[in-house]
């Protein structure tokens, strides 16, 4: 009986009903599912990072210390890495250290890894973040404009040239682009500094170098998405309302295109992180990439672990943000 | 698919490039191996010359020949990484897709996250564990790329698993392995081929990056990446030492990328549709845009008057009229139906009236809304005139609402723009409209998204949306075709109610004659882009004259008809735009056709009160009277 009366009261009318509605809302279950999966992935990531050192074939002590090192030195390395303890003890230690914000100390500089991270993360994040912004700000409006220009097979010349140019730019390795940029703009024209980490001007060339390829990819995607959005029935409905072109594109086309752009944007951010590693080397910038490469070359395992962990977390976090944005833009995503 | 692939310029260019690269990597080390190894320190770091096309490196190696020879190692590594990616990725993805529901969701989400990890980072991690070098690079890049293959394999497996032919094969008793090889692989081959070429392109670029960082190929072995690294070191002495390998990497990536793209285009022509279709040329009559034979007297009281409406599309570089000389008028509060088979031009007529014909279609003729000739309305006012006096309800309510917008915003935006209502006023109006279309709890519906509503509810929303600006004309284009039979009747009742209560004139487009006869005051029957008969609904039931209308009436299933009798259907097919016959377009399917019907097109002539028909036989003039006219028309037949 109580059940029937409860169903008769319209949901969301009373304060209690509203709270109950919110708690059982699809958003909440969406968030719960996403948080669980992010936590699971982070645990896996930390475990993989932990295993890095343990996966080294042979005796890490010999490999890290070199064949010329004495047995005592090798034992010391094993001890510092905790390799002389049982596997489970090592794993437990690793986690407790993680929770205390302790990532070990560098073999080379003896600095705590966390300090090295702090010193370098900012510079890398600047490049990757600025590049992501540039990529999104150019590709989304640019792709929509190109889509509008080439809709219904108009302006075939524009379409052909654009496709050709975008394919070529999409195939250029960051490495080559960075080098050419350094050559022309820094050495020949002397507009921007050749390298270094200081100031906004030093940021321009690295950002351009890693943005070009993602821009070419995303522009093409957004154009095709715009074309398919423009041919949908709901755009025809919107057209039948005789809204101004601006409203039609901003309110009806854009949100549906942005969802597709963001899905790829998340992947492109990972690409940008990889690109950062390369351009940091080309432009001699300080950053996580340079640190990671140097630590691999000098077999500085605590630093390697720290870098892999942080870069991995950055990728996972970027994906989580994209998921969240997608869900708030396209309500259908929530129920997935 | 193969034809389409080789027809596209990117397919041709890409496959030529790939072929060259493969030939080069097979034969270059045999032919030019010695020349590439020869060095002369005194000739180091020199720019391009006749002897050394791309100059020399620090030790005086010829860069051009080194480049040709290094192709083999570069390709070996890229192909190796891709092979690993396929071997690891496909079982991973296909396996994940075959897991039970819950585990599958987790596995697929995990895969989605793994794809996000750049293969360069994964390769660096591998370099940290193994010794940095060829092996770590190939394995690292391979594993990094395998997740995308896994994703492709998993979604394809999921898509194919439940398809009929797979179940059919299972029922017949085909073994699992055979099933995979004979039935599944051919179906996913396209997508795998695309992923493979794209992956080769990606590995070439990633390997170069690794070599540059010192974590890839180690000297004395050389690949393009290693050469690029060396070249970058002496960039300021001779930039060609870097540009040469850089361009080689870019060209290889481009070649494989082009092949992948051409494959994608060829396998999914719909998505990439922009190739012009090639059909045979044929002649048509250009005198088809003549004025309506029986001009309707202009009546200022009509809400809509359409005269000599033509809609044409370019086909084979010619403009083909698809709707020809349609005339109709609509009195306030009237409900008329336009009926015809698909291809008769009835929907295009409606879209032309609503000015929604997509590019490159062209609309000719005169359309007057509430006495205002749309061609004479200043351009800036056309949108307001149409937006406030005409609304359209489309066929498929499932796809006609914007999925990313709340119902509220979709309802109010037109009223706010055209009538300058405040948000609160517009929302109030929206609630009223939703109540009028019998949607319960309008407040709640307003806050919902389209995917939360059923098809019938969405069609009601669309009708409410059409009513927002209190239009004088509502065009309903097959409004019930996509709905359940029970819902169809409700929607028709709703339209009839709106017509009766608000005095909104309605044009109902349908292929369903019974539906139109029941609901409309007057009926226009269209065939091959023309109106062939126009009459009141009463006349339709008892006095239809045109053989086509009679055939349509015969084709309407009737409850009184004995079950055993086969359903009547009209023999033959509606002619397509290319081949509309001369004379009366229907004569090829008409049982009553006489000679004149194939020569001279019958005009739409007034018979009795409000009854017009275009038929020689029905109007009792089966013999030709004007051979001069006929000879012009006979030209159409060729």
Image (tube, rainbow, N blue to C red):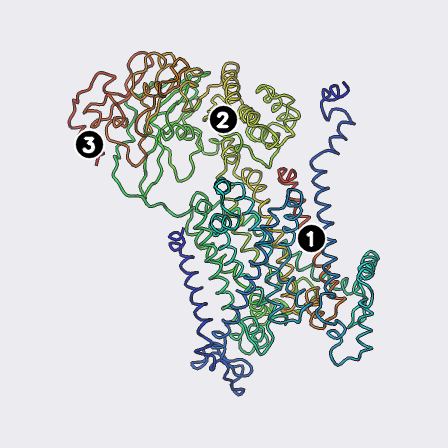
- The residue to which callout 3 is attached is B634
Q: Name the residue at 29% across, 20% down.
A: B547
Percent position of residue B283, x then y: 25, 39
Viewer-side residue, A59 vs B345: A59
The mark lying in front, picked from 2 and 3, is: 3
Between the residue at mark 1 and the residue at mark 3, the CA separation in whole angstroms equals 72 Å
Q: Name the residue at 79% across, 27% down.
A: A16
Label 1 secondary element: helix
Percent position of residue B406, x then y: 62, 33
Q: Are marks 2 and 3 on the same chain?
A: yes
Label 2 secondary element: strand
Q: Name the residue at 65% across, 71% down.
A: B132
Q: In the displayed structure, does residue A64 sit left or right of residue B237? A: right
Residue B483 in the image: above or below residue A280: above
Label 1: chain letter:
A
Residue B391 - label: 2
Q: Are marks 2 and 3 in contact (CB under 8 Å)?
A: no
Residue A316 - label: 1
Q: In the displayed structure, does residue B407 sit left or right of residue B568? A: right
Q: In the displayed structure, does residue B125 sit left or right of residue A85? A: left
Label 3: chain letter:
B
Residue B532 in the image: above or below residue A196: above
Label 2: chain letter:
B
For disc 2, the neighbor class at 10 Å (few under 14, some 14 to 19, many from 20) is many
- Is residue B211 at least partly visible in the picture? no
Percent position of residue B130, x then y: 67, 69
Q: Quadrant of residue B291?
A: top left
Between the residue at mark 2 and the residue at mark 3, the CA separation in whole angstroms equals 41 Å
Viewer-side residue, B259 vs B284: B259
Q: Disc 2 or 3, which lies upstream in sequence?
A: 2
């Amino acid at each position: 009986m109580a059940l029937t009366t409860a169903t008769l009261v319209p949901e969301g009318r009373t304060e209690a009903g509203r709270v109950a509605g919110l708690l059982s809302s699809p958003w909440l279950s969406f968030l719960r599912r996403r948080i669980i999966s992010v936590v699971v992935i982070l645990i896996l990531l930390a475990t993989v990072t932990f295993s890095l050192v343990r996966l080294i074939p042979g005796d890490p002590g010999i490999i890290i210390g070199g064949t010329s090192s004495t047995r005592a030195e090798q034992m010391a390395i094993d001890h510092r890495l905790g390799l002389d303890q049982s596997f489970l003890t090592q794993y437990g230690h690793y986690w407790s250290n993680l929770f205390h914000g302790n990532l070990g100390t560098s073999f080379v500089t003896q600095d705590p890894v966390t300090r090295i991270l702090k010193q370098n993360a900012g510079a890398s994040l600047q490049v990757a973040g600025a590049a992501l912004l540039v990529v999104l700000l150019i590709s989304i409006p640019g792709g929509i404009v190109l889509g509008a220009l080439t809709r219904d097979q108009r302006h075939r010349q524009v379409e052909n040239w654009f496709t050709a140019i975008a394919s070529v730019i999409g195939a250029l390795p960051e490495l080559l682009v960075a080098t050419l940029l350094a050559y022309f703009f820094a050495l020949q024209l002397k507009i921007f500094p050749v390298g270094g980490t200081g100031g906004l001007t030093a940021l321009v060339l690295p950002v351009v170098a890693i943005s070009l390829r993602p821009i070419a990819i995303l522009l093409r995607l957004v154009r095709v998405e715009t074309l398919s959005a423009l041919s949908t029935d709901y755009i025809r409905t919107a057209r039948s309302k005789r809204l101004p072109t601006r409203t039609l594109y901003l309110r009806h086309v854009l949100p549906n295109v942005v969802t597709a752009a963001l899905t790829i944007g998340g992947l492109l951010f990972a690409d940008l992180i990889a690109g950062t590693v390369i351009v940091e080397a080309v432009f001699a910038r300080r950053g996580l990439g340079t640190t990671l490469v140097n630590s691999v070359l000098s077999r500085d395992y605590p630093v390697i672990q720290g870098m892999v962990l942080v870069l991995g977390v950055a990728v996972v976090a970027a994906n989580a943000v994209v998921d969240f944005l997608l869900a708030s833009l396209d309500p259908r995503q929530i129920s997935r | 698919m193969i034809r389409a692939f080789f027809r596209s310029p990117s397919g041709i260019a890409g496959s030529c490039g790939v072929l060259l690269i493969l030939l080069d990597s097979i034969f270059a080390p045999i032919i030019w191996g010695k020349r590439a190894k020869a060095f002369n320190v005194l000739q180091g770091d020199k720019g391009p010359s006749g002897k050394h096309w791309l100059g020399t490196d620090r030790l005086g190696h010829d860069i051009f020949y080194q480049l040709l020879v290094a192709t083999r190692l570069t390709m070996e590594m890229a192909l190796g990484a891709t092979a690993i990616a396929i071997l690891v990725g496909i079982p991973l993805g296909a396996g994940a897709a075959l897991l039970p529901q819950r585990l599958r969701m987790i596995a697929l989400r995990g895969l989605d996250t793994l794809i996000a990890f750049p293969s360069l980072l994964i390769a660096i991690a591998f370099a940290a564990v193994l010794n940095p070098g060829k092996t770590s690079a190939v394995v690292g890049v391979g594993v990094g790329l395998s997740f995308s293959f896994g994703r492709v394999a998993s979604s394809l497996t999921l898509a194919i698993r439940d398809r009929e032919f797979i179940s059919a094969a299972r029922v017949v008793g085909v073994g699992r392995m055979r099933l995979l090889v004979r039935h599944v692989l051919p179906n996913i081959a396209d997508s795998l081929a695309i992923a493979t070429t794209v992956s080769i392109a990606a590995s070439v670029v990633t390997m170069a990056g690794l070599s540059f960082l010192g974590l890839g190929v180690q000297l004395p072995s050389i690949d393009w990446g290693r050469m690029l690294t060396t070249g970058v070191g002496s960039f300021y002495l001779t930039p060609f030492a870097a540009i040469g390998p850089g361009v080689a990497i870019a060209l290889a990536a481009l070649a494989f990328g082009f092949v992948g793209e051409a494959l994608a285009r060829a396998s999914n022509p719909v998505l990439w549709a922009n190739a012009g279709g090639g059909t045979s040329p044929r002649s048509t009559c250009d005198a088809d845009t003549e004025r309506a034979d029986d001009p309707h007297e202009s009546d200022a009281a009509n809400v809509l008057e359409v005269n000599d409406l033509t809609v044409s599309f370019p086909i084979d570089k010619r403009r083909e009229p698809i709707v020809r000389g349609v005339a109709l008028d609509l009195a306030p509060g009237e409900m008329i139906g336009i009926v015809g088979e698909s291809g008769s031009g009835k929907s295009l007529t409606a879209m032309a009236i609503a000015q929604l014909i997509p590019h490159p279609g062209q609309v000719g003729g005169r359309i007057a809304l509430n006495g205002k000739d749309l061609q004479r309305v200043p351009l800036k006012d056309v949108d307001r005139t149409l937006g406030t006096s005409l609304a359209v309800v489309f066929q498929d309510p499932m796809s006609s609402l914007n999925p990313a917008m709340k119902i509220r915003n979709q309802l109010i935006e037109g009223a706010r723009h055209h009538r300058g209502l405040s948000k609160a006023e517009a929302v109030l109006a929206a609630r009223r409209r939703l109540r009028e279309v019998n949607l319960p709890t309008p407040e709640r519906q307003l806050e919902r998204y389209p995917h939360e509503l059923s098809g019938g509810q969405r069609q009601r929303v669309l009708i409410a949306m059409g009513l927002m600006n209190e239009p004088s004309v509502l065009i309903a284009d097959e409004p019930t075709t996509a709905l359940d039979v029970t819902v169809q009747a409700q929607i028709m009742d709703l339209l009839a109610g709106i017509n009766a209560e608000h005095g909104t004139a309605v044009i109902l487009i349908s292929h369903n004659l019974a539906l139109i006869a029941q609901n409309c005051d007057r009926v226009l029957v269209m065939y091959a882009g023309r109106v062939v008969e126009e009459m009141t609904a009463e006349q339709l039931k008892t006095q239809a004259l045109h053989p086509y209308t009679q055939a349509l009436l015969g084709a309407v299933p009737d409850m009184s008809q004995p079950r055993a009798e086969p359903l009547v259907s009209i023999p033959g097919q509606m002619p397509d735009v290319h081949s509309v016959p001369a004379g009366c377009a229907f004569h090829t399917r008409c049982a009553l056709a006489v000679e004149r019907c194939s020569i001279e097109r019958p005009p739409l002539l007034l018979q009795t009160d409000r009854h017009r028909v275009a038929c020689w036989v029905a109007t009792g003039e089966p013999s030709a009277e004007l051979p001069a006219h006929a000879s012009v028309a006979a030209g159409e037949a060729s």
